[in-house]
Amino acid sequence: MRKRWRRAWLLLLALETFGFQEGDPEEPTGLECYQMGPSGGMNCTWTGPEANTTYTLHYQSLKFKRNQTRRSQAPAGQSWVVIGRSSLTHNENYAVWVEAGDGTRVTPRLTLTPHEIVKPDPPVLSLVDVTPEVTVTWTNPHWPQHFSLDLACQLRYRVSGTPNWTRVHEEDVEPNSYEFSSLEPFTAYEVQARCIPEDRKGFWSEWSPSQTFQTPEAAPLGLVDVWRVTSPPESGEPSLLLLWKPLHSKAARGVIRSYSLAFRNGSESPASLESPCCSVSLPSGTSRVWISANNPVGRTQPANLSLERQDLPAPAGLQVAAVHGQGLRVTWEPSTDPLEGEPTEYLVEWAEECSSSKAASLDWVRRPAGTHSALLTGDFRPRVPYQVRVYGLYPGGFGASAPVRAYTQEGVPSAGPQGLQDHSVSKEASVISWEAIPLAQRNGHITHYSLYLATPTGSPQTYQPIAATETSYNLSGLEPGTSYQLWMTGSTSAGEGNASSIHLFHTPDSRWEAVLASLLAVGFLLFVACVLGAVLHMQLLDLCQKVLPSWCWEKVPDATHSRITLYEMDRDPHSYRGPLVQDPDAEEPPITELDIAEPADHVNQGYSTLPQLESPVPAQPHGDDRPGSEPRREELGPSSPPREEAWGQRAPVTSGYEKHFMPTLEEVLGLA
């Protein structure tokens, strides 16, 4: 028994030695009480098993009014109660516990002294100066003189808007002030303070309201991140647009008022200009650019961008993969050119491929030499194609890799292939051609196409997969003379997309081939018949000319269309009157009378005797009575002069008309 009491006494002695006495507010008993300020009441809180139970707080005097127990009932569902200062005695020791409505104790018995559980009010902060260092002071809450110990205070601060606080070591804090050092320039901060009695008996006060301040500006640090973008002349944008990123607030250390630029075109002397953030158009032949950021205190060191050569060795093996929820992971292989070596740094550039302005969506990050990967983060949009390129930067220029298209998140295509067309190869085969899905409607990398073919009454047949690089497909096994419906879709890793518009086509009918062959055969036979008929006609005409008289087959001239010109010669061969045509001045044409008489002899010395001709005498040039002139008779015989002399050495003209209708010599002589 004595050993047990000795062990218990040693345990209590150890607890008292190490400061864990009965009623210590830090002891986790489920019941906690503190005095609200040096002259306030006592607030007790507890945790009960049920939220709607009615609890009663019991506090019993242990020193002056021994065994006197008082009660304070909390409303139903409330787990705290405040005991007024008038109900408490200074320097009195109390035993406190909580019971439920049925008398069941729900908390352990807690022993305490009110003046040892005081929770001070929070201090009031104020600023003394912010240039060049920030000094914060505070006023301690009201503290009675009979409390022999002063208050110890603690400070904490943070950058405004950030979640984490930084605490100041208590040994560095003076009684009522603190001077901050090593704060970031031109940065907004907030600071708070709390206090506790020096003997640490009691509770820390609540943190004071935040006191905010901003540190003064300083000269900016770092280099401006500058890059360029080129555009073809037909795009309507500047051929060389210089872009740069605004300095981070930690590097700016103040308000950046402007940027100073200097650029050189070939061997010309550098030109300078001032520009706001964050782009400026430069001459297309610019070979080198320097840029600095300015604030009221100073400026950064100039950043250098060389554009002299743009064909230097470039990174190879560029690969881009989407990282879910993060962005794009880019990897590449460095160039192995022995003359130039590895670049001094790498620049990874990306932009929306369907954007109307590349500069509006362009972004980039830099990676030091020896780094061959980068994680691109930013405001990436799903189902939007991005063009990624890696540049190797050298002191004398840069080299660019081939671009790679990438998506952070793919979707199904919102449209199908465009411009479907059919080209019949035969009555059972056709070639289908199409145009690729527009880039803005692909929503991802096209893995393959699917082709659907159906008759108006039949179920569709599927032809897949068709490679994404193909633009035509050969359909075979079609039915002749059949109408077909055709449509296509594209697929990405997210699935199959929307279908294209339906294309209708008709295969050739085999009956038309027979009809066409028959028409060709009939046409050929008609052609042969025409040729044979022409040959037979020629032969028949030739035979008729040989067998029949000439008047049966010769063509009789038409006198009304005859072009033969007859001439009348006067007896005087030198008096020529012209063609025998009707004189417009004459009222009637001349009349020729012909008398036919029996010849004396049928043959006269080899000359044929012609009858006498009676013809009107030609009118004299001075005569006006040609219509009334008497006819004259002219007898032609052997003594007549030759015809050549009568016609003035001019041969008479003989036409087929006279030859055919005038009587022949035999007919005149009566021999025929």
Image: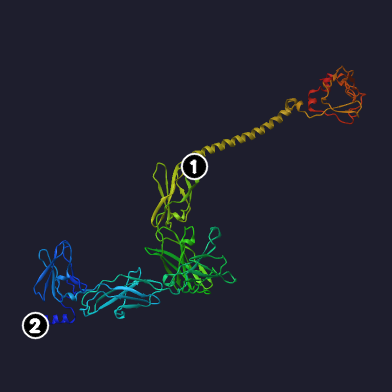
Q: Which residue is mark 1?
A: 508
Please provide percent x and percent y for residue 524.
59, 37
Q: Which mark is residue 177?
A: none
User: What separation in Å lies between label 2 and label 1 (alpha carbons)?
Assistant: 117 Å
**SS class, disc 2:** helix
Does label 2 or label 1 sit earlier along the sequence?
2
**SS class, disc 1:** loop
| Residue 40, placed above or below residue 482 | below
Q: Is residue 375 left or right of residue 99?
A: right
Q: Which mark is residue 3?
A: 2
Crowding near the residue tagged with mark 2, few <14, some 14–19, many ≥20 C-alpha atoms within 10 Å: few
Residue drawn at x 90%, y 30% is 648
Please provide percent x and percent y for residue 562.
77, 28
Please provide percent x and percent y for residue 206.
26, 71
Q: Is residue 534 left or right of residue 368?
A: right
Instruction: Assign the C terminus to one quadrant of the image.
Output: top right
